[in-house]
Amino acid sequence: MKKIQYIFTALLVVAVTAMSLTSCSSEKLGPSIFPDEEDVLDPTATTYQFDKFLKDNFLDVYNLTFLYKMPDVSANMNYNLVPATYSNAVDLAVSCKYLWFDAYAAQAGQDFLKSYGPRIILLVGSQAISSATREPVDGLSEGGVKITLFNVNKMDASDKQSMNENYFHTMHREFANILRQNKTYPTEFNTVSVGHYVPAEWRERGDEISSEGFVSRYASSENSVDFAETIACYIVFTDQQWQEMLDFAACGWHKDKNVYCRYYYYPDNDMSKEIKYIPHTDAEENKIIVVRDADGFIIQRYIYDGTTHARINIYDVEDEDGIDGVAAIDRKVQIARQWFREAWGIDLDALREEVRTRQEAYNIEELRQLVYGIQ
Amino acid sequence: MLVALSSLLLTSCLHEMDEVFDEDAVIRMNNAMAEYEDILTSNGGKWLLEYYANTSEPGYNYVLTFAKDGTVVMSGHNKWIQYIKNKTWTSGFGSEKSMWEVIGDNGLVLTFNSYNNYFHLFSTPDAVPTQGGTSTAGGPSTAGKGHEGDYEFNLMKYSGDTIYLTGKKYNLHMIMTRLPENTDDEAYLSQVAAYNNANTGMFTSKLNNVYIVLPDGKRWVVKSAASGYMQMYPEGEDEVMMSEYHNFIITMDGMAFRDVLTLEGNTPDVVYRVQRFTRQADGTALCVEDGKTLITADPLVDCLFSPNYSWTSTLKNTVAGGNFVTLAAAITKESKDTKNGGDGTSMNSAKISYVDSLESYVLTMTFSKTGSNRPALYKLKVDASSPTQFKLTYDGAYNYGPRYWDMCPSVQQFIEALTSTTMNLSSESLLSPVKITMSQSSNPENYIIWSL
């Protein structure tokens, strides 16, 4: 009997629930509460030229919203941030188009960027400094759709080298991050430097990091960052920068009093005395003099002692870390190159060459006319 | 359960709703945004923003001129602007054009959304520069935080040409009031900066304290008012335990605390709420809310004769008048006249101060010769009959006092002029009396201006 009661009760509940599900369906949805307005630019607005440039070159082409008037709600509320200056926002936008979007479009086509490019680029005037670590962040990519570029107000668009190191490098790294968020990269990459990542202490490392197979200090923080950094550095480094990094990678380094040293010497050139190490930066400042033989091989290196003006012979520290830094970096580039080709159909070297060519031809005055020349 | 479920159904299909608003939320939001844009840009679009970056710095005046093309000219006059401009710490004027917008962001928000060097300095996370190498104002510990000032503001209310705002991230209350269209930003802000001067402004750092005097006579001792960040505690009570700290802003017509203060009076459970004060002709500040609470300093006679201060005068005709100028000149003439008993010195200045060793107030005349100073001390007894009136009595000469008393007949006449009649006191500001005029009640043309 109890069983019948349960069944009856259950049927009633189902019936009542069904009624409730249908009882409100008789009324159709009304019109949207949002006004049906087209997003039309106001020609009288002081930002009209810039807004039109952004609409024509980013929104209409890539469905990308370029946020240069920073609403705090779009940024991380845990940081204290300020908006970008208008003039620097213009400089960065035209540079983004020329050195990033146009470069990728030339090598991969516009459809590639339409599919995988960010949907939002947010410019922030200040650095994002963690109040916990006091360390700055210069760029962020989120969810594969949004890239935030910080510290725009410190930007000097006429300083090509600074732009390359501080902004274009960040752009390409964050875009590489977006790409790897869309398609995983080969796990083999993670094995190249396994055991040598230092997530907490990477900021304390110096040029010796190349000897351990990393293209930058940041790359040594974790493998996914390493992947993006390797791509970004490969794309934006000049030949000279890349070669210098490889030279450092081939060197030995000795840690002396918390400073990495590439050279050592004997006081008074007396080899019976205790070896002293020269911090790399000190050696550079003292200008190393190199003596080569007729075949170009280095036979002697020396610097002047600052106090006695005596000539001090200096010697390379042997590379004893057990890591072939050059081979590790080369291997990482090879993996990235293969991933670009197979996953995206992009020739990384051609992309690099495209960016290089554009970097050399980069002229901010001309690029600004893309905005200020709009009638 | 069934009954309950059924009762829910009975109400769930009730489609008739009261129409509280005539239009949809987005339409209303858009209308409100347009309304605020009109308010901000109409009548010249000029507003005074009383800006607070945080709860421990003074408020800063900004004159904002909103234009319909989305630009705003932001003008300020403070030490941070001056530091940006030339790395010095006096108050300086700066004005720059940037952008503004009213946006719908969980309510109406006024945002200054492109960087303005002279305004967003309070929002940048860079470490606050330290003044004179001290860490009182900032330092490395502020890296990542900066001043922690807002640049986006929730628009709360518009009433009587005043817009009430709260900072979006840090929730500090602020107001904007409309200024006349022809206001000259720099002239206006320079005048306010003069009122804000820590030495000669509305408050002075030269006085140890002033008072908030409540309508029932209760006084709250106020310290460090010239810094823009007041320490205050009920007079007679424990300073350490009872002190409160409040920041405020100096304005063209007076001053205002960041928030309403609730101060206890003499009667238990009776409190007074005060926020805005108007600067009066005598320099004191009168509460706008109750029309009675006053901010003032000690009576002039207690300022002039205080163990805490010393007052000086050169006794030249720019800071003295009548026979005091004449007698001071005669004293120097007599002391310089070596042929007739003088010692070749000049009387350079006079000072009124309390001398501990004499346990008395003293008039000190300083005679100088080739770098050496000879202080002549004349002890005075003070008998105050009102806050601005007193009578002095000569009570003996000390140190070089007897020497010059005998050497210079004019010294005796000077002391006679000081003590022969009651003296009146006046000052341009009873709140910041850094200069006090002391004049003979019998002949006001005989006077000395004493400077703190």
Image (spheres, rainbow, N blue to C red):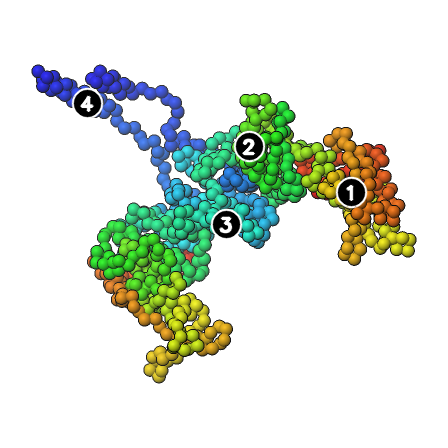
Which chain does the residue under circle 1 lie in?
B
Q: Which residue of the protein is positioned furthest toward the front in this rendering?
A: B357
Quick check: A127 above or below A193? above
Residue, disc 1: B363
Spatial distance from mark 2 to mark 4, Cα to Cα?
64 Å
> Which circle marks residue B242 in the picture?
2
Could you tell me the amino acid type at mark 3? Gly
Residue, disc 4: A17
Circle 3 Cα neighbour tier, 10 Å, few/some/many (<14 / 14–19 / ≥20) = some
Residue B44: image location, x then y, percent: 56, 38
> Which circle marks residue B139 in the picture?
3
Q: Nearer the viewer, residue B164 or B410?
A: B410
Contact (Cβ within 8 Å) of mark 4 with mark 1:
no
Which chain does the residue under circle 3 lie in?
B
Q: Is residue B198 left or right of residue A59?
A: right
Q: Quadrant of the N terminus of chain A?
A: top left
Could you tell me the amino acid type at mark 1? Leu
Spatial distance from mark 2 to mark 1, Cα to Cα?
38 Å
Residue shown at the point (78%, 38%) measured from the top left = B438
Q: Is residue A164 left or right of residue A108?
A: right
